[in-house]
Image: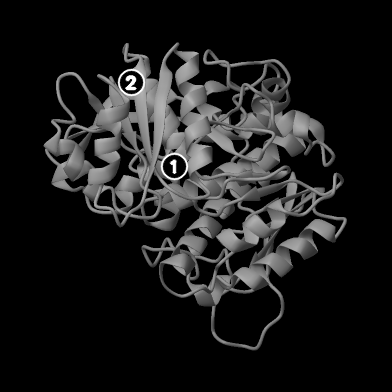
Amino acid sequence: MTRATDLRRKRWRALALAVAAALYGCQSKSGASDVLDPTAIAAPAGQAGAAAAPAQQASVETPSSPASGTPALGSPASGSATSGGPTSAAAAKAQLTLGTGPTKVAMLLPLSAPGSTGENGRKMYDGARLAMADLGDKLLTLTIEDTRGDSGYAKDLAVKAITSGTAKAVIGPSELAAAQHLAKLSGSKRPPVLALADNFAGGPGVYSVRLSEADSAAAGAAGIAGKGARKFVLMVPAGADSSAVESRVANALSIYGATLAVTLPYSPTDGGAKVVSDMSSLVEAPDAVVVACGGGSPTAVLAALKAKGIPGKTVTLIGTDRWLERPVDPLYEGAYIATLDESETGPIADRFKATYNYQPDVNVAYAYDMVALSAGIASAAGPDGFNKQVLENTTGFRGSTGLFRFRSDGSSQRSMPFFKVEKGRLKLVEKQTAGF
């Protein structure tokens, strides 16, 4: 083991010991709780021996099953380290229990779902395994169940976990319909849910973990407002999500003394010409235009804006992370976008690749962060520490996906890198920007 590797391991073990101070008053320079940032925490005085102990692999138990020749999870033959990809569905689809800690946490993942859904679920499983090995093994008992990518089944598993009386927190599900159902349920004594679904708005006690378009738009607008822009226009697809995007952008701009002059809902079928024409008649000389796209493509609106000379010397164009769900279009050129940097997953990247033989992506990072956060809370406050005061603290947490915090309405806010599209590529402008 190299000295650098040994130092990293010491810091990760020290995190479990120092997390109480991070949660309850020991803040980083940015003001965020360093619950998930091991590089910022040194071993507490007098605890060097404990910190120096090598990280133990999370214990893994599998239910009995017919003999199939499949090695047990945790053995070299079954892990991704030999296959160069996520753990196989055959190895991961059964219910699994990791760790032996007193705090019980449930995790719901689409391990055996077909296609990219299942692949992402198994990546999240690998991320959870690494977090348990780093931090959670002696703090948590993590029960992982396979939702199969079925929203109805995921909902049933989640309700069962919430009402079991044993789980102190639920990580997942990743199925949007299931997460939305949970957000509609009432009950003040249920454990918090850290939902992994894409484009989930959140709800009281059901927290949206992933970066949302509203958050990306707000951080992008804040980045440009911080450079002096004052008058903004928001173009957003008409629908239920438009108000969330509008509210987040308006709040972010207010921090910098900027204003949202008008919000213009548009239909994906109108070709973009109408909404751009409406902007021209309603707003004189805007400094910046924010274009959200929902699940559709922004190119029709961007083509209409380009015909008006936007982006240009006087008007800045701001996109969102959802633009990047498609290949970068020439019409994106010159736009600014705040999004997670998928090539940089923080301090876990090197160790993850060495362990599982593939590069971690945001699925790995989100899962890792939620398990690490659970371990941090368990270390700091014990099994009963999963409450609103801790989860909704305003300074937030720092993880491998950057700085984030949860709001009382279940939404999350994130700080993230700020990019400009140049020659078809994302060029880093700022390492960190945030709409809060």
Classify residue 12 as left or right of residue 265: right
Q: Is residue 135 above or below residue 66?
A: above
Number of callouts in the render? 2
Quadrant of res 332: top left
Mark positioned earlier in the residue sequence (1 or 2): 1
Q: Indicate the position of residue 243 as horizontal and vertical percent values.
A: 52, 39
Q: Indicate the position of residue 183 as horizontal and vertical percent values.
A: 69, 51
Residue ID at (67%, 83%): 65
Q: Is residue 432 visible?
A: no
Q: Indicate the position of residue 81 as horizontal and vertical percent values.
A: 42, 61
> Pointer 2: what residue?
224
Classify residue 61 as left or right of residue 270: right
Q: Amino acid at mark 2?
A: Ile
Classify residue 370 as left or right of residue 284: right
Q: Is residue 36 visible?
A: yes
The residue carrying pointer 1 sits among few (fewer than 14), some (14 to 19) or many (20 or more) residues within 10 Å by Cα, namely many
The residue lying toward the viewer, choosing from 233 and 192, is 233
Q: Which mark is residue 213?
A: 1
Residue located farthest toward the front when viewing the structure as drawn? 281
The Cα–Cα distance between marks 1 and 2, rounded to whole angstroms, is 17 Å
Secondary element at tag 2? helix
